[in-house]
Amino acid sequence: MADLSLKGVEKAYGTLKILHGVDLEIKSGEFIVFVGPSGCGKSTLLRSIAGLEEITGGTLSIAGEVVNDVPPSKRGIAMVFQSYALYPHMTVYDNMAFGMKIAKEPKAEIDRRVKNAAEILQLTKYLDRLPKAMSGGQRQRVAIGRAIVRNPKVFLFDEPLSNLDAALRVATRIEIAKLKESMPNATMIYVTHDQVEAMTLADRIVVLKEGRIEQVGSPMELYKHPGNLFVAQFIGSPAMNILPATIEQPGASTVITHLGGRKATLPIATEPGTKGQAISFGVRPEDLTVATGDDYLFEGPIDYIEQLGEVQLVYLDIGRADAPLTAKLPGNAPIKRGQVLKLAADPGDLHIFDASGRSFARPKMAAAA
Amino acid sequence: MAQASGTAAGKSFFGRFGVHIAVLFFVTLWTIPTLGILVTSLRDKDQIIASGWWSAFFSSSQTENARLPAPNTAVSKDGRFVLEGNLFAEPGEKRITAFGTRAVAPTEYEAGAVADLGDGETLQINEDGSFVAGYPEAQTSERGRRVYFAATVPPRFTTENYQTVLFSEGIGRSFLNSLTVTIPATVIPIMIAAFAAYALAWMRFPGRAILIATVIGLLVVPLQMTLIPLLELYNGVGNLFGVPSKTYLGIWLAHTGFGLPFAIYLLRSYMAGLPRELMESARIDGASDFEIFIKIVLPLSFPVLASFAIFQFLWVWNDLLVAMVFLGSGSDQLVLTGKLNALLGSRGGDWEILTTSAFITIIVPLIVFFSLQRYFVRGLLAGSVKGG
């Protein structure tokens, strides 16, 4: 329904800068997820879009209209809070109808929209209840219903699942995904620190760190082609293994030397002048497989095994005492602690990053984005 | 008490037992005087003098006296002159255990015994009060003999005392005066403080911190220090409008002023503890500050409003000083505390009047406290315990 455009958005509390010029274009109907570690400014960014925080620089426009100084209620947004923020003294019905009652909409219209939202969220039989008589998941549905009733251009979700227990979180996550499907025109912006939520829900993920956007892209882009070390380690669990390495042979495909002098060839182009440069070499635990022949990347005794059933996390001692190599192997792989294991990976799944942490695969990334 | 049982929850049986014993002890200690006043106020005034209130539920023995009819009305019977009758208007209303004819020995003879009073004169007084006095010859004296007797009186409870104090001692009028002072003096500060507290808790404006600091500072200003300046100010303004110096309006304003700092402080800290997301959510829903206050903050602040109402009500109801300064001492303005004080002087020995008046004075605070006490505890904990 509405494009959202952020140009150089800044937010500072006195001298403390939280957002350092955020540029982002969000298309109508997109599901955007902001992720990042605690304190990265993702909630502040969301609250700035909502109008709960005034931005101190840049412009913010919704549907082509600059809304820097427009109060929250006039921006055409609805927000779902982590703590639900339901009005405890009002019934579910009144909670959902509150905004429309304030706007003095006709009673019949209020009734129609509340009933409709309740229908979508299967809350119809709870309309007369008070929030305290409902479970966490139901409360969060009421909060979402309150947003739907407002019929906003943009839905804002501020860590809506953080207060739910694990099972309910999965169920509600799926409900939100279905809700988005049923409202293809609604633009949704969702803040979370949970990368599973980000991966499963997002059309595009915005990774934030210290008030700056690190990378924007679809979940698989971010996973397959992380633009820098931070994104590489933030997306994916367990985190990507990062090892020091040097470029042996730059060119259309690059040969590198990493720990223990072993070489690897990657189908990533590097500049001729980069020969001998110290770089970071990354490989995801789940991309590693047990090798039998001589064609392997790593070799070392197994330091520890975490058996998770379907998979086991294997910590390989490859000579770096403080940082063992993590590998995710099938749960039934016949391995024992102390056994010396050889691991290999498909060259296409290897990542290299320059000294400043940026991916050498960047040009390809830029084309994809 | 809530806290006591809370800390005891993790302790051993004996720990809990000790706490319960202690609670019981203090509850008893606090309740007994009130009970005493209540019981005394319901007793007959003669019984109050004869025995303590704790014996009110049992028969009490008291020594009384009565005068027999004039001896010259004795009638001739079996060669003697005899007087017969009953000491009581209603035979048997008290049970006589012993009697006598001299003040120094009021219980010389057992009830029913025939006492020989010398010169052939006899007297017999029975348990139910009937008596037979016998004389050997006709008497000329017109003065009846005084007799003393010990009587057991069954407990007697009466509401006479209440009728007396309410309608003839002026307590009823003072009760109404006290209500006239207290109700507006409770409602007005709550209304003002609620608005102020919301603004100080949730609205951003320059000077807010200083304003809060000032309110906190006003909490510690001694009331006595402000009485004279306030009265001067009030009289000055009153003269301007031709209002007399001692009016109900004056005392309402005075109590409002004295109550406001605490009210604002208490309400503000409670409102500031409400979740911020609620206000933000309402703001996104399009509510103005006034609507947020009326529709969300006010209903959610009911416990603390009730708690402050109790504080203010009790304080104003029990106040004597402010009432003496800002109200006159005529019957149309004298409040209960003032009236009690006056009664202590004029009816100092009349326990039935004093206890009854006292009980009428405390009954309203008791009702207020017990009907709102759960908010009282909650309000005291406001801000200190989340979700209290």
Image (cartoon, helix red, strand yellow):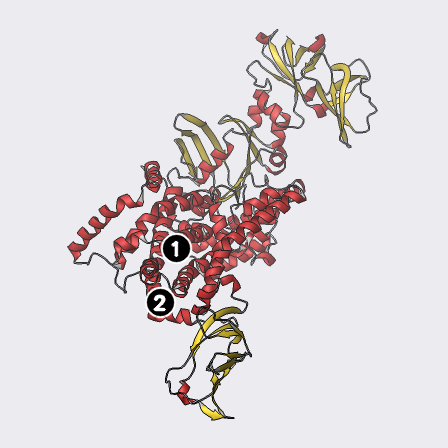
Q: Chain of mark 1?
A: B
Q: Nearer the viewer, residue A207 or B115?
A: B115
| Residue A1 in sight | no
Tell me, for residue B313, which label it has, or none: 1
Tell me, for residue B176, which label it has, or none: none
Q: Nearer the viewer, residue A211 or B307?
A: B307
Give the quarter of the image for residue A364. top right
When the figure is inspected, residue A177 is found, relative to residue A14, above or below; the finding is below
- Earlier along the polypeptide chain: callout 2 or callout 1? 2
Q: Position of residue B333 (x, y in %)?
A: 28, 62
Q: Residue furthest right?
A: A334
In the rendered structure, are the residues bearing label 2 and label 1 in contact, judged by CB atoms less than 8 Å apart?
no
Q: Residue furthest front?
A: B119
Q: Amino acid at mark 2?
A: Gly
Q: Position of residue B383 (x, y in %)?
A: 47, 42
Query: Given this view, does label 2 or label 1 mark the residue nearer the observer?
Result: 2
- Position of A227 with respect to B335 (left or right) is right
Mark 2 vs mark 1: tell me if same chain: yes
When the figure is inspected, residue A216 is found, relative to residue A134, above or below; the finding is above
Tell me, for residue B172, which label it has, or none: 2
Q: Amino acid at mark 1?
A: Phe
